[in-house]
Image (spheres, rainbow, N blue to C red):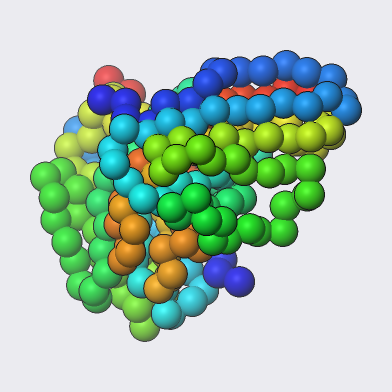
Amino acid sequence: QEKVQQSPESLIVPEGAMVSLNCSFSDSASQSIWWYQQHPGKGPKALISIFSNGNKKEGRLTVYLNRASLHVSLHIKDSQPSDSAVYLCAVSDNNYAQGLTFGLGTRVSVFP
Amino acid sequence: ETAVFQTPNYHVTQVGNEVSFNCKQTLGHDTMYWYKQDSKKLLKIMFSYNNKQLIVNETVPRRFSPQSSDKAHLNLRIKSVEPEDSAVYLCASSPTGGVAEQFFGPGTRLTVL
């Protein structure tokens, strides 16, 4: 069964710093890797996804995928206090009906 | 903007009672899901439904059952709650096929005394 591990568990950074999050997964056949953001008392919200090896940039977000090492990272440039949340890495396989397999998340705190 | 609605926001009950949670999505998606988020914040898939057909039923206890009246609604019933059922239950929806984004509701927090 797919396993998803995230690091670090938590991160505290000053406003304007780069936030770097890591995720490793166990199944090389995983189709897509998603990053979700979850604020307290809210449901997760998708931020960005990646399927192919390499990187993908959307606004302040950049994600890097290395299928050979089963590793994906998310980088948030110019972090803001509103970025304070739990960031969840999730992987999906060929069958959308299987749902997503999530990691435990990284808690990010951005202080002004 | 919320497009996946869940009720109630929270529910407190005693061991052995029956509870039911509601979920409605206004996105026109064909597939809906129920996830359980435990005290460690780990999200695990419980069920997925496509066009009123149960597609995946993970190894959840038989006291849990999904109920759907149409593709926009997917409710969750727990027949006789146990203390380990205390968690946040999250509903989600997505278009069918591929690896489309899943949209989550705000969750229902269940506390079993």
Residue with the most extreme right position: B16
Question: Which quadrant does the N terminus of chain B fall into?
Answer: top left
Residue B110: give x, y in percent of width and height. Answer: 68, 25
Residue with the most extreme front position: B69
Residue toward you, A58 or A18: A58
Residue toward you, A58 or A91: A91
Residue appearing at x 32%, y 26% in the figure: B2
Rendered view: B94 above or below A93: above
Residue A52: give x, y in percent of width and height. Answer: 24, 74
Q: Residue B92 appears in which quarter of the rendering?
A: top left
Residue A95: give x, y in percent of width and height. Answer: 43, 69
Residue with the most extreme bottom position: A68
Question: Which quadrant does the C terminus of chain B fall into?
Answer: top right
Q: Please give the count of numbered marks on the rendered protein.
A: 0
Rendered view: A52 above or below A110: below
Q: Residue B109 appears in which quarter of the rendering?
A: top right
Asked whether residue A111 appears in the rendered view, the answer is: yes
User: Is A58 positioned to the left or the right of B10 in the image?
Assistant: left
User: Is A50 positioned to the left or the right of A72 in the image?
Assistant: left
Residue appearing at x 31%, y 75% in the figure: A66
Residue appearing at x 17%, y 37% in the figure: A78
Residue B8: give x, y in percent of width and height. Answer: 56, 18
Residue appearing at x 27%, y 69% in the figure: A51
Residue toward you, B40 or B10: B10
Asked whether residue A38 appears in the rendered view, the answer is: no
